[in-house]
Image (cartoon, grey):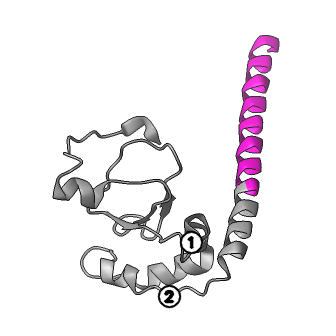
Amino acid sequence: MLDDLKFVNIQSNSADGKRTSLQANDILISITTELGKIGFIPENFGEAYINQHTALIRIDPNKAHAKFIAYVLSSATMNKTINSLNDAGAKAGLNLPTIKALSLKLPSIEEQIQIAETLSTWDNAIQTTEKLLENSRQQKKALMQRLL
């Protein structure tokens, strides 16, 4: 996925740089291709910028937990909602006012944190299992080549 990186030269203190630069806990939504695909920027991600195909959501930590919001936005129910908001012109797409108008019912911040941490633990376990499975496949392949 990161094999085809594109690098840009943007002054971080310029208007474009400030408007498009990413920070930890930012949420990204694809608003053109793959409508509603969600991204989350972890701590220590490094310098990065978005383009016109991506909506940036920056959560006030006093009002909500960003990782929880990212999980909600990536749920099947919300993905269906987001896709139903498609502008449906000549090209599929969402606009920023539509994204801003999304309404979410939120539990307390404490509960949001607890839910996000639980889901993150499961995500990590799934990722570890997938790596183990891929490693096992590679070992089987190598063994088969040696034995056959």
The verdict on residue 125 being magenta is: yes
Taking the image as drawn, is residue 47 in sight? yes
Give the residue pinned by disc 2: 103
Q: Residues within 10 Å of mark 1 (few under 14, many from 20)?
A: some
Q: Position of residue 96 (x, y in %)?
A: 31, 77
| Above or below 110: residue 47 | above
SS of the residue under disc 2: loop
Q: Which residues are magenta?
A: 121-148
Q: Residue at x 20, y 40 (%)?
A: 9
Residue most toward the front?
A: 62
Q: Residue at x 78, y 31 (%)?
A: 136
| Above or below 27: residue 8 | above
Residue 88 in the figure: left or right of residue 119: left
- Residue 20 occupies which quadrant of the picture? bottom left
Q: Position of residue 111 (x, y in %)?
A: 72, 75
Q: Residue at x 75, y 31 (%)?
A: 137
Discs 1, 2 touching: Cβ within 8 Å = no
Q: What is the quadrant of the C terminus in the image?
A: top right
User: What is the tally of numbered marks visible in this picture?
Assistant: 2
| Above or below 128: residue 53 | below
Give the residue pinned by disc 1: 69
Residue type, label 1: Ile
SS of the residue under disc 1: helix
Residue type, label 2: Ser
Q: How far apart in space, not on screen, are marks 1 and 2 (Cα)?
A: 11 Å
The verdict on residue 13 being magenta is: no
Earlier in the chain: of badge 1 and badge 2, it is 1
Q: Position of residue 40 (x, y in %)?
A: 51, 58
Residue 39 in the figure: left or right of residue 49: right
